[in-house]
Image: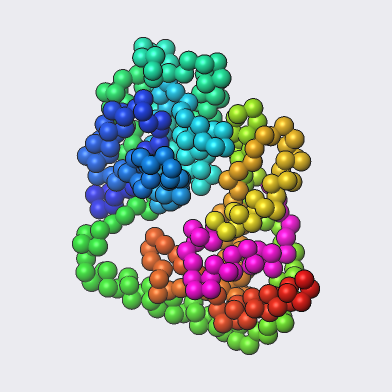
């Protein structure tokens, strides 16, 4: 592993039965120069009345890798009917995060309070463990074995699947840092000039007309059949105005990409939950809608080319992109609102 880079690694596991194992993994990751994170370090973890899933999701978003440990329990269930561990795994897998799995050997001795005792719990655990087979996974039986396997395989895993990581400013030569900042500023300025030239005098009516064009975008969601979670992808045929309306209100000042994704996810849930239920009539629940990364890039690029949105360079940084409406975008949004009010 790079001596300069520090990789953020999200530890995903059931909690009460693996407290000692989680602490041992935290210590091992720190000794390897990594940055361990997990739900127990995030706001709301010990408050049963507070939903800390947004914080967990953000931590996974910002992490370079996920280390998942499966013990003898499937875990406590969320409102959607899957365990917290299963939800973290599904979200990380949807983001295509590199996941290194350590699956406990169920033949090894295990205390009764650390394993599933009901037939339903055993079945849920079995199905979940089967889904982990698609990832790099190693069998463990004791805490010592688990830590040893992590130390042995994580460096190779990181080398084989490179991730951005984090670099302290002090570890970069001062001259190089200044040069990079200057180049980034020049690049941002050139991009703004480019977009300004491309849309030197776009008319409001032309932009509104362009928003009526059809587009096919891909999205993913989770469906739950007999308590088991399955990630599916589907197609959405929309007009660009629907997509623009779904998050344009967030950009009255400016909004992060995370906020925009949340608004788009809510739009998909409202528009396509019924459709997914019809396509999968045996599904008892549908959740976690989100556009695929390719579709999100298409949305961002197309609306930029239309001159409706731009990056807020003042508030964006290396780990957080912030977007805002252009003056044209504000005019178009206002015109759409007025048009909608007249029709209503």
Between 101 and 260, the residue placed more toward the observer is 260
Residue drawn at x 67%, y 53% as measured from the top left: 270
Instruction: State the image coordinates of residue 134 (x, y, percent, origin top left).
Output: 52, 32
Q: On screen, 188 above or below 64? A: below
Viewport quadrant of the C terminus:
bottom right
Range shown magenta: 234-261
- Decide which of 48, 124 is in the foreground and name it: 48
Which quadrant of the figure has residue 338?
bottom right
Q: Is residue 70 above or below residue 195?
A: above
Q: Residue furthest front?
A: 49
Give the left or right position of residue 90, taking residue 170 as reference: right
Q: Nearer the viewer, residue 55 or 138?
A: 55
Q: Position of residue 23 (x, y in %)?
A: 27, 33
Rendered view: 140 above or below 229: above
Q: Is residue 145 above or below residue 230?
A: above
Picture residue at 27% right of the left edge, 73% below the top: 178
- Which residue is most to the bottom? 201
Q: Residue 44 lies in what quarter of the image?
A: top left
Please indicate whether residue 24 sits to the left or right of residue 139 in the image. Answer: left
Number of disc labels? 0
Residue 60 coordinates in the image, percent (x, y): 43, 47
Magenta stretch secondary structure, dominant: helix
User: On the rendered image, what quadrant is the N terminus found in?
Assistant: top left
Colour setup of the view: rainbow
Quick check: is 241 in the magenta stretch?
yes
Q: Position of residue 291 (x, y in %)?
A: 60, 53
Q: Residue at x 67, y 34 (%)?
A: 284
The part of the image, by quadrant, that contains residue 315 is: bottom left
Q: Is residue 207 visible?
A: no
220 vs 239, left or right, is left
């Amino acid at each position: 592993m790079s001596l300069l880079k520090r990789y953020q690694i999200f530890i995903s596991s059931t909690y009460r039965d693996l407290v000692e194992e989680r602490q041992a993994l935290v210590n091992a990751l720190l000794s390897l120069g990594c940055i361990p994170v997990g739900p127990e370090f995030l706001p709301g973890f010990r408050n049963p009345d507070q939903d800390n899933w947004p914080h967990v999701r953000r931590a996974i978003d910002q992490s370079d890798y996920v280390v998942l440990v499966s013990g003898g329990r499937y875990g406590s269930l969320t409102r959607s009917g899957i365990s917290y561990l299963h939800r973290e795994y599904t979200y990380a897998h949807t983001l295509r995060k590199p996941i290194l799995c350590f699956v406990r050997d169920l033949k090894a001795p295990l205390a009764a309070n650390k394993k599933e005792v009901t037939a339903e719990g055993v079945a849920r655990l079995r199905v979940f463990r089967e889904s982990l087979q698609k990832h790099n996974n190693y069998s463990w039986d004791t805490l010592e074995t688990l830590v040893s396997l992590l130390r042995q395989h994580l460096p190779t895993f990181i080398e084989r699947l490179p991730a951005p990581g984090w670099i302290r400013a002090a570890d970069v030569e001062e001259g190089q840092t200044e040069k990079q900042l200057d180049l980034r500023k020049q690049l941002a300025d050139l991009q703004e000039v480019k977009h300004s030239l491309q849309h030197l005098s776009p008319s409001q009516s032309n932009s509104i007309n362009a928003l009526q064009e059809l587009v096919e975008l891909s999205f993913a969601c989770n469906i739950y059949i007999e308590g088991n979670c399955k990630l599916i992808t589907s197609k959405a045929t929309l007009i660009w105005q629907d997509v623009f309306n779904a998050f344009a209100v967030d950009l009255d000042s400016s909004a992060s990409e995370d906020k925009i994704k949340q608004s788009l996810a809510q739009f998909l849930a409202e528009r396509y939950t019924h459709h997914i239920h019809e396509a999968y009539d045996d599904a008892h629940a549908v959740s976690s809608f989100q556009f695929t990364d390719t579709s999100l890039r298409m949305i961002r690029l197309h609306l930029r080319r239309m001159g409706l949105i731009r990056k807020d360079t003042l508030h964006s940084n290396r780990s957080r992109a912030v977007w805002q409406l252009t003056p044209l975008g504000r005019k178009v949004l206002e015109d759409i609102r007025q048009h909608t009010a007249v029709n209503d």
